[in-house]
Amino acid sequence: MKARLTGVDATRGIALLGMMAVHSLYESDGQGNPTWSFAVFGGRAAATFAVLAGVGIAFLTGRRRVRVADGLPTAAALVARAVTILAIGLALGYTDSSLGAVILPYYAVMFLLAIPVVFLPTWAVAVTGGLLAGGVPVLSHFALARLPPATLDNPTLGYLLHDPVGLLSELSLTGEYPALPWMTYLCAGIFVGRLTLARVRVAAWLVAGGSALAVAAITASWVLLHHYGGLTQIQATIPQSILTGPETQEVLALGGDGTVPTVSWWWLAVDSPHTSTPPDLLSTIGTAVALLGLMLLAGQVTAKWPRRIIGVVQKPLAAAGSMTLTLYTAHIMFINSAYDVYGPGTGYVVQAVAVLLIGLGWRATAGRGPLEALVSAVSSRARRWAGNGMRLPRLRRAPAGEGA
């Protein structure tokens, strides 16, 4: 149990550091090519967070299919979790967070969409994830031309009250982290979270299977674009596209803002970060699952000195990973404040060291992170309230002689 949770938390800690690198460091060099940090973490860090959110939902629901009898408490817990995360995300919108798109409102929608998924058997969760990965990008391709363009601004409570339909459209389909295609990540995480992660064989299969999926998706994208002429077709449609030639090249090299242009079906073969295409979704699921498997395998090492070295590395990562909601919120507030007076490299190192030390200190003294404790408390109370509401009042047994 401890090794499993440490592996999951350590994976989440790596994703946190990767996301901070994407926000803090340069995306490209002077020639427009991705920097090494963006090439490694661009799109993958956020995807890993989403997959681990699905793993967390699997843990929350007992790592098994939810029974109908437990349906209302489970749904209430997920709704409460979604509402609380949405409130935190909308509050972050008031921090003038121009650096880094806030993902929390999108998570709120995903938690709501996950409610019917938790009632499915494990095999059906896997099938649902596959259908979402292949089907939603195609349906989005039809719908995007008929939907209002996304503002790509970080939403606030005022945005929610002024245009709730527009906000829901953006959070679901047109925004930076569109919830409908991103449900593929949550399905993958729920599927993985229901496995016996403490077993070495399962962890090894996650490494092998995740790596194979990532390689297959990237290879399929390359073949479709370069061997079958997809890239040529995309370039031929630039005059009809909403993107200019340089903007098209930028999306192909550095990724998009959650969607791709609808002028050509060949755009769905792209695997660039944050394009929400089948290759993008599947390749990033693969890397997230492989990383999780690697961290779980590391926790199974028993040799004395390797075990100590792994512990030194995993312990701070797991500590930070156990309170990523709090640290993510602090990171977004910091990089958009006057306190961030550092250059990209120095600023990243300062933040990385800070989150690791804060994570270690907080876990050793207070335990759970403050925002994690808030979400857990609200979720638990909603579960208890719904559970009590389902119980029928107990009938008082009539004393002898009070028969009808």
Image (tube, rainbow, N blue to C red):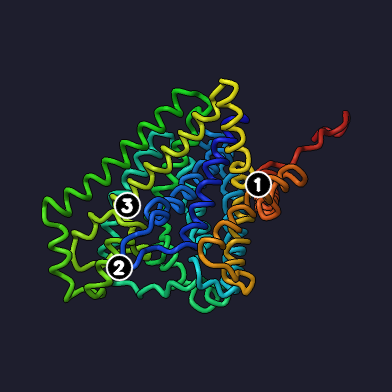
**Which one is nearer the viewer's eye here, 294 or 161?**
294
Task: Tally the numbered discs.
Answer: 3
**Residue 232 location in percent, x, y?**
13, 62
Q: Quadrant of the N terminus?
A: top right
Residue matched to label 3: 280
Pair 1/2: label in front? 2
Going by the numbered disc 2, the residue's amino acid type is Leu
Going by the numbered disc 3, the residue's amino acid type is Asp
Q: Which mark is drawn over residue 144? A: 2
Going by the numbered disc 1, the residue's amino acid type is Arg
Please tell me whether residue 297 is drawn above or below residue 101 in the rendered image: above
Residue matched to label 1: 383
Q: Is residue 35 visible?
A: yes
Please tell me whether residue 322 is drawn above or below residue 87 in the rendered image: above
At 68% from the left and 47% from the top, the residue drawn is: 380
Among the two numbered marks 3 and 2 on one chain, the one whose residue lies closer to the N terminus: 2
